[in-house]
Image (spheres, grey):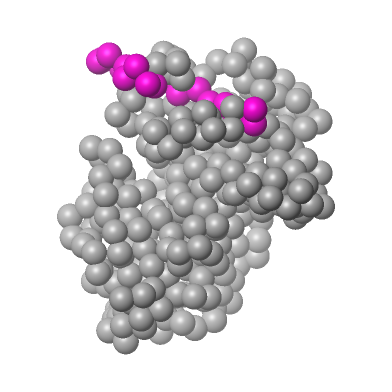
Amino acid sequence: MNIQCFLSSAARNFSLPYPAACLLCCWLPGPHSVTRRNMSSKRKMDHLERTASNYRQNALYPAQVCGIINESETVKRLRVAVHPDFTFKAGQWVDLFIPGVEKVGGFSMCSSPGLLQREGVIELAVKYAKHPPAHWVHTTCTVGSRVAMRVGGDFFFDPFPSDPSVDLLLVAGGVGINPLYSILLHAIDLLHLNRTSGGRDYNIGSIYLCYSAKNTQELLFKSSIVEVCQEFSDKFSCDFHVTQQSTDVDPNLQPFVKHGRITEEELLAHVDPQRTLCYLCGPPPMIEAISKTLGDLSLPKEKILFEKWW
């Protein structure tokens, strides 16, 4: 069954409890857009509450899960067939409405807009948690499960062909890699596009990813990231940081792995106040510490963009 038939079937049979049901395929008023997330939050809020001031698209679309893999021992990766009118920018998230689940989930895309254009699907990587939407993904979701999604978020990378070239600094902690992996894949798509067009499209500068997790088992997408490093060694580089590694590191990963936390010296080597654009995503304490360090390195505040999901 092709994607369009798949989604048509999902839409005919989709049901949601009120008020979500009345939103399906409707246009909704969206909140005013903001450019940076407030860093002073002191309590854990629900996704809709935490993102109330962020931009949201006006449409809620039916979707259907068409693939599930175990990305790690604690993370499932969903492949979701979406409506033909569904669009997003690299780095954005979705409100995930699940039939029978009162809470609305919030998950960043870990795929590129290019994959959506080519195959009509998006991908979400969801870490196990007791929060109902994440718990549903890990305990109930199957291929064929029907959901609805609405795109939102002010954290994205979507340059125009005529925009000045920038060097991307991507700093991730844990599952905070999701939106940054989307941005990385989009940057690679832009690189391919610029090369095939003879330099007429956006000219991406260098890309450096600094990704921290407890151990190498919790480093999501690591094989693909290493492949990109090897294929585009003139443009892309990365370091994996592990803070609680208790086993030997895979020899294929060893050249990219550092033990301990991200250091100021490491960031300094990849910060140019004139060219660097930094995207951060991870636990709030990490984001606050890295943001301060980047500020100390003279990177302007408007060039430090962040997303916090904890």
- Going 77% across and 40% down the picture, which residue do you hit? 165
Please name the predominant secondary structure of the magenta segment in the image.
loop
- Name the side, left or right, on which 251 lies relative to 265: left
The answer to whether 79 is drawn above or below residue 20 in the figure is above
At a point 49% along the width and 57% down the height, the residue shown is 115
Q: Of 65 and 292, which appears nearest the observer? A: 65
**Residue 230 locus on image (x, y percent):** 52, 28
Quadrant where the N terminus lies? bottom left
Residue 279 visible in image = yes
Residue 288 in view in this figure: no
Q: Camera-side residue: 72 or 233?
A: 233
The part of the image, by quadrant, that contains residue 4 is bottom left
Residue at position x 66%, y 35% from top? 168
Residue 122 magenta-highlighted:
no
Along the line of sight, the residue nearer the viewer: 248 or 176: 248
- Identity of the residue drawn at 37% across and 21% down: 252
Q: Which stretch appears magenta? A: 234-253
Quadrant for the C terminus, please: top left
Q: Is residue 34 above or below residue 117?
A: above
Looking at the picture, how far across and down is residue 32, in whole percent?
65, 65
